[in-house]
Image (spheres, grey):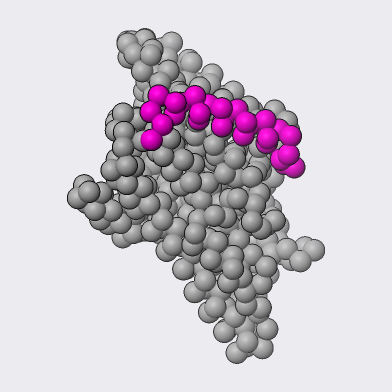
């Protein structure tokens, strides 16, 4: 992460874990927890944090076409390689499943809704957050990667070519985006493949202005470190408010307030002054923060793979049924205690594989594109 916002990165790692738990289909006590069911709102934290970090790293470094080209190379290198890799993983697994299913007489379908050739092309173009399809496709959580790439590109273009008009233009776009979402989004703030890019615009721009506010406050935030007890109380209170808000208001009109609440969190935790920040800077949480993008992109791949292995390999051979099939759905576990046990297994696999994709895909790709950008 740009600068020294370790606690904010730790927050991102925890949010990625919560989003992974949100998407896991299981007969489980955990599945029904309100904080898990509404964890899709934590994607708005990603958007706000992205705007904040990009403002910190590039806010004063975008003044012409050459700066814009450097920015685009770096952002592409940061986002696209892992996106393409996870897309390839799902395509390969789907084709393998189709082959195994037909050999075994199961008759698994290939390239059905959500995984057609044209949907793959839209994913390769990273346009899956613009309402081209009325459903999520391939690596379904990647809609937010599409949204973030194009919204951050719009910021860079305005900053590089519009000068002092960039911030007012972005503010106007964000206000228009929020009004549009309030008027048109069928699921309030839970806009994904339909209006995902518009949702991202709101959070990203708020993040940009939160960085400006942090710069304006300056020493005030630094002085919070001298008042550990008060800062800890503020952090704990804010964390409690966020958790209650997500659990209670995630599926209501109030969910439109999520980017503003996460903006307050980014501002407060950027000071790294209290006990919650101290915990977020512990070694395990730092690791989750570093691997957070991989966790977010890999969890759907892992969960789909677990479903395929369980349905076609383990469950047919197991003396005890491990899966449930209510109304055509496929859920882990036949009783809640059994589903509860699958959650830590899933998360352990996701984290272990995410560490590898971080080291083998994210870091080399990021460094290669960064070197290309420096050459411009």
Figure check: 309 above or below 215: below
Q: Nearer the viewer, residue 146 or 230?
A: 146
Q: Residue 306's quadrant in the figure? A: bottom right
Give the farthest residue toward the right: 327
Can I make out residue 66 in this image?
yes
Q: In the rendered structure, which segment of residues is drawn in magenta?
A: 161-187
Q: Is residue 340 left or right of residue 90?
A: right
Report if residue 20 lies within the magenta region.
no
Whole-percent x, y for residue 25 in the image: 65, 56
Residue visible at 70% across and 37% down in the picture = 188
**Residue 178 location (% of width, % of height):** 63, 31
Q: Is residue 322 left or right of residue 155?
A: right
Q: Is 178 included in the stretch rendered in magenta?
A: yes
Residue 42 lies left or right of residue 69; in this view the side is right
Query: Would residue 142 be visible to someone looking at this image?
Result: no
Q: Quadrant of the N terminus?
A: top left
Q: Nearer the viewer, residue 27 or 252?
A: 252
The residue sitting at 66% across, 78% down in the picture is 109
Q: Which of 231/359 is in front? A: 359
The one nearer the camera, 263 or 336, is 263
Examine the residues drawn in magenta and state their main secondary structure: helix
> Could you tell me residue 181's position as x and y percent?
68, 36
> Residue 313, position in %: x, y?
58, 77
Q: Does 115 appear above or below 195?
A: below
The image quarter in which residue 185 lies: top right
Residue 98 occupies which quadrant of the picture? bottom right
Q: How many marks?
A: 0
Q: Is residue 189 above or below residue 275?
A: below
Residue sitting at x 56%, y 27%:
172
Residue found farthest to the left: 375
């Amino acid at each position: 992460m740009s600068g020294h916002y370790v606690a904010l990165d730790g927050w991102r790692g925890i949010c990625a874990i919560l989003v992974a738990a949100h998407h896991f289909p299981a007969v489980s006590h955990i599945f029904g927890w309100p904080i898990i069911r509404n964890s899709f709102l934590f994607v708005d934290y990603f958007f706000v944090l992205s705007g904040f970090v990009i403002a910190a790293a590039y806010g004063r470094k975008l003044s012409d076409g050459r700066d814009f080209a450097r920015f685009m190379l770096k952002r592409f290198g940061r986002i696209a390689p892992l996106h393409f890799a996870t897309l390839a993983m799902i395509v390969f697994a789907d084709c393998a499943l189709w082959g195994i299913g037909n050999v075994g007489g199961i008759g698994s379908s290939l390239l059905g809704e959500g995984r057609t050739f044209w949907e793959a092309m839209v994913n390769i173009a990273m346009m899956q957050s613009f309402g081209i399809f009325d459903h999520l496709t391939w690596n379904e959580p990647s809609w937010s990667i599409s949204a973030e790439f194009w919204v951050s590109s719009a910021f860079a273009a305005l900053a590089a070519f519009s000068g002092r008009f960039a911030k007012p233009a972005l503010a106007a776009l964000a206000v228009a985006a929020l009004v549009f979402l309030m008027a048109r989004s069928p699921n309030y703030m839970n806009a994904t493949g339909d209006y995902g890019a518009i949702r991202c615009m709101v959070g990203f721009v708020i993040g940009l202005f939160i960085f400006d506010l942090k710069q304006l406050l300056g020493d005030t935030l630094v002085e919070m470190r001298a008042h550990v007890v008060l800062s800890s109380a503020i952090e704990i209170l804010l964390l409690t408010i966020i958790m209650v808000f997500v659990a209670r208001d995630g599926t209501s009109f109030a969910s439109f307030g999520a980017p503003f609440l996460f903006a307050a969190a980014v501002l407060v935790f950027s000071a790294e002054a209290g006990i919650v920040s101290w915990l977020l800077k512990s070694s395990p949480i730092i690791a989750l923060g570093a691997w957070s993008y991989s966790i977010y992109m890999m969890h759907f791949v892992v969960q789909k793979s677990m479903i395929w292995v369980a349905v076609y390999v383990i469950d047919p051979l197991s003396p005890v049924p491990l899966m449930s099939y209510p109304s055509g759905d496929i859920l882990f576990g036949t009783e809640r205690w059994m589903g509860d046990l699958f959650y830590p297994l899933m998360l352990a696999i996701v984290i272990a594989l995410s560490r590898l994709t971080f080291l083998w895909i994210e870091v080399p790709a990021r460094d290669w594109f960064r070197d290309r950008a420096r050459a411009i």
